[in-house]
Image: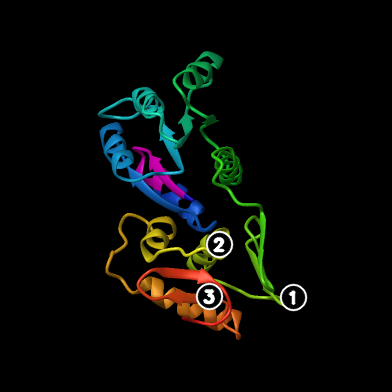
Amino acid sequence: MRVLIVEDEPYLADAIRTALGRQAIAADIVGDGLAAMEAVSITEYDVVILDRDLPGLHGDEVCRRISASDSPTRILMLTAARRLGDTVSGFELGADDYLKKPFEFPELIVRLRALERRSGKAAPTTLSFGDVSLNAFRFEVFRAGRFTKLSRKEFAVLHLLMQADGGVVSAEQLLEQAWDEHANPFTNAIRVTISALRKKLGEPWIIQTIAGVGYRMGEGDE
């Protein structure tokens, strides 16, 4: 999942990104409404976490513009407002969900996962390929019944490959979905992460390299 955090309080924005990173969710941060519109015009985000009171362009207007564009991006609006009317107006503008400040990070994660399911992009909680199984909510991976401890980035990459169910996932797709906007497009991080995954999952290798195309789940290497 790729998320855009639109929040003008830097400490809160960083805290949200840290919480998402622990769940292997890649996130970018912008601090005002105009920057948010620029970001969504460049990257197709699964969910935008949108603070309502923003400088530059109010969160209400950002929400309205994203909704009017027929974008598949879901909007989770954040607000300090307590009045029911404020919540209702947020939904009328096109928000898909609403979370009042202060909030607990576990609730934020659950709401994001629910929005992902509603977008039609979400895979089942438990994925299997061959003798490898992955549980996205428990952050667990097993091979042949043996628990395999992975880093957050390794888990994110494996999750994307298993979601493809044997289909090829390009390096560009992995970089876009498992890293954030600061990732160097010429980095060798993907190759290093794939190599680490193979070693941790053990032989026979279950991740194939398709030369010049990308990677896919399957025994052996090509």
At 58% from the left and 62% from the top, the residue drawn is 165
Which residue is tagged 2? 159
- Identify the magenta region: 2-13
Viewer-side label of 1, 3: 3
CB-based contact (under 8 Å), mark 1 and mark 2: no
> For the residue carrying disc 2, how many other residues have a C-alpha within 10 Å: few (<14), some (14-19), or many (20+)?
many
Q: CA distance from mark 2 to mark 3?
A: 12 Å
Residue sitting at x 39%, y 27%: 63
Position in image of residue 54 (x %, y %) = 33, 30
Residue bearing the label numbered 1 = 145
Q: Residue at x 51, y 33 (%)?
A: 101
Label 3 neighbour load within 10 Å: few <14, some 14-19, many 20+? many
Q: CA distance from mark 1 to mark 2?
A: 18 Å
Q: Position of residue 129 (x, y in %)?
A: 65, 68
Vertical relation: 91 (above or below) 116: above
What crowding class fits label 1: few (fewer than 14 Cα within 10 Å), some (14-19), or many (20 or more)?
few
What amino acid type should be assigned to the residue bearing mark 2?
Answer: His
Residue 127 placement: quadrant:
bottom right
Identity, as a three-letter code, of the amino acid under mark 3: Ile
SS type, badge 3: strand
Image check: 149 left or right of 170?
right
Which residue is denoted by mark 3 in the rendering?
Answer: 207
Q: As shown in the figure, which amino acid type bears the numbered disc 1? A: Gly
Task: Say which residue appears at 50% left-offset and 82% top-offset.
Answer: 221
Q: Nearer the viewer, residue 107 or 131?
A: 131
State yes or no: residue 8 in magenta: yes
- Which mark sits nearer the N-terminus, 2 or 3? 2
